Amino acid sequence: MRTKITASSLWDGERLLANPVIEIEDGQIASIASGDADGKSASAGSGVGPFAGATIAPAFFDVHIHGAASHDVMEATPEALGTIGRFLATRGTGSYLATTMTAPLDATLRSLEGLADLIEHPEKIEKSAKAAHQTAFPIGIHLEGPFVSAAKCGVQPKEYLQPTDPAIFDRFYEAAKGHIRLMTVAPELEGAAEFVRHATARGVRVSLGHSDATAEQTYAAIEAGAASGTHTFNAMRALNHREPGILGVVLTCDKIYAELICDGIHSRPEMAKLWWRAKGAERAILITDAMSAAGMPDGEYHLGGFPVQVANGRAMARGVLAGSVLTLDRALANFVEFTDAPLERALRLLTVNPATMAGFADRVGKLAVGREANMVVVNERGKLIAAIRNGETVASYSAA
Ligand SMILES: [Zn+2]
C-alpha cells in the first residue's frame, strides 16, 4: 500500500523543494514530487501530514553516542541496543555509530564482538518487523579511546589507555569485524601519524581529540589522513595565539570536519557561533556524545562502568563533565538558536556531513527514491515536530 507524506517544504540533503509529496511503499521512498503551490493536491489522499509550515528532512545520523535510556552501547546486547534505538527513533535519529570508550582491553574486545554481530544482524535487536520500524540501528562503531592523551582523557579511565600500537588496533578491528568506522586519536601520542595512516588504510576515519597536541603535531596527523576533530573545545588544549594547538588547527583547517556537542553546557553559545563561522556548512558536524542518562530523569547513572550524577541536564563524574544527555533534535534547535543559521544549512550538520565524513553517504543522510523513508519534520526554528521511520510516525510533538 502506498501512503504519502506532505509538508510545506522538503530538504532532501541537497535541495529545497516546495510543497513536497513523498510517496512511500513498503517503508521505502517510491517517489518525490512537488505538489500544488496552494498545497491542495498535497493534502489529498491518505498519509501523514500535511505538516503546514514545516520542513521534511532526512533522519539524523549521530557519529558519537555512548548510550541512552539507561543503557550503554558497550553492553552490546539486543536488549541494550533495542532500548537505546527505540528512544533515539523518537528523537529523529535514524542511525548512529555505537561509541565505545576507554575500558579494559578484554571488555572492549567483548563489546566490539557483540556490536559487530548486532550491526550485521539488526534482526537480533528487534525480532518483529513492526518493532524494527520504530527503532534506530547502529551502522558502525566509533572507538573513542583508548588511544587518547592521559592529560585530556576527561572521564576516560587513565589506567586503560593504550599506546598507538597497530597490533592493538588490529585486534580491535578484527573483533569488530571491520565495523570500526571512526576512531578518536590524540595526535601527540608517540607514533600517532603512522598509527593514523595504518587505520586510514583500513577505511577507518580518524578523529583528533582528547588531546593536548601542538599545532604541528595536529598537522602531522592530518597529513597522515585524519578526517575530523572530536567534540571541538572539549578535552582539547585551550587556544593560545602563539601556539594554536589542536583547537586552533581543528577550527581553521578546511581539510577536516569537526564535531560539536551543542547543548549550551559543554560550550557556551558564543563558542558554537565561533565554531560555525570557522567550520561552515560543509565541515561542521553536530553530535550528542550522549550517555545512558539521555532521555532519563535526573539521578545516578553509569558510563563505561563508573557512576555519573545527572542534574539539570549536566552529567558529572569525578568533578568533570561525563558525556551529555543531549539528543540530536535538541542539538539542532539549540544550534539554530545560538547561530541563526538558515535551517537547510543547519540540517546538513546532522545528515549529509556526518554521513560523508564517516563514509556512509550512500546509505544515510539523504532522502531519495529507493531509500528507507526515515525522516524528520521540523519547524522553521529546527524544533522536531515528527519523527518518521519507514514511512510511519514514531513520535510527534507540538510545534509550539
Ligand atoms: Zn564521547
Image (cartoon, rainbow, N blue to C red):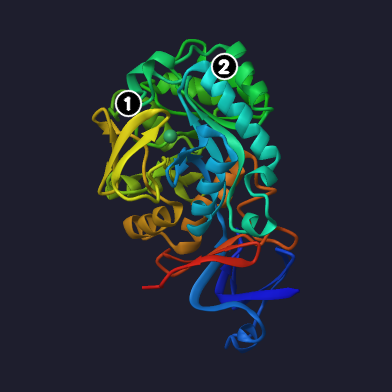
Residue 31 circle label: none
Q: Position of residue 93 (x, y in %)?
A: 53, 53
Q: Is mark 1 on a helix, strand or loop?
A: loop
Q: In which quarter of the image is residue 329?
A: bottom left
**Which of disc 1 and disc 2 is earlier in sequence?**
2
Q: In which quarter of the image is residue 19?
A: bottom right
- Residue nearest the viewer, comparing 380 with 26: 26
Q: In this view, does 297 lie to the left or right of 100?
A: left
Residue drawn at the location 70% of the way across and 48% of the way down? 362
For badge 2, the amino acid type reads Phe
Residue drawn at the location 31% of the way across and 35% of the way down? 308
Which residue is under mark 1?
237
Does 362 sit above or below residue 188?
below
Which residue is under mark 2?
195
- Residue nearest the viewer, comparing 298 with 237: 298
Q: Distance between the residues labelled 2 and 1?
A: 21 Å
Q: Dots 2 and 1: beta carbons under 8 Å?
A: no
For badge 1, the amino acid type reads Arg
Residue drawn at the location 40% of the way across and 19% of the way down? 149
- Mark 1 burial class by Cα count in 10 Å: few <14, some 14-19, many 20+: many
Q: Can residue 255 be seen in this view?
A: no
Q: Can residue 362 be seen in this view?
A: yes
Position of the N terminus, as image quadrant, is bottom right
Q: Is mark 2 on a helix, strand or loop?
A: helix
Position of the C terminus, as image quadrant, is bottom left
Q: Is residue 347 left or right of residue 197?
A: left
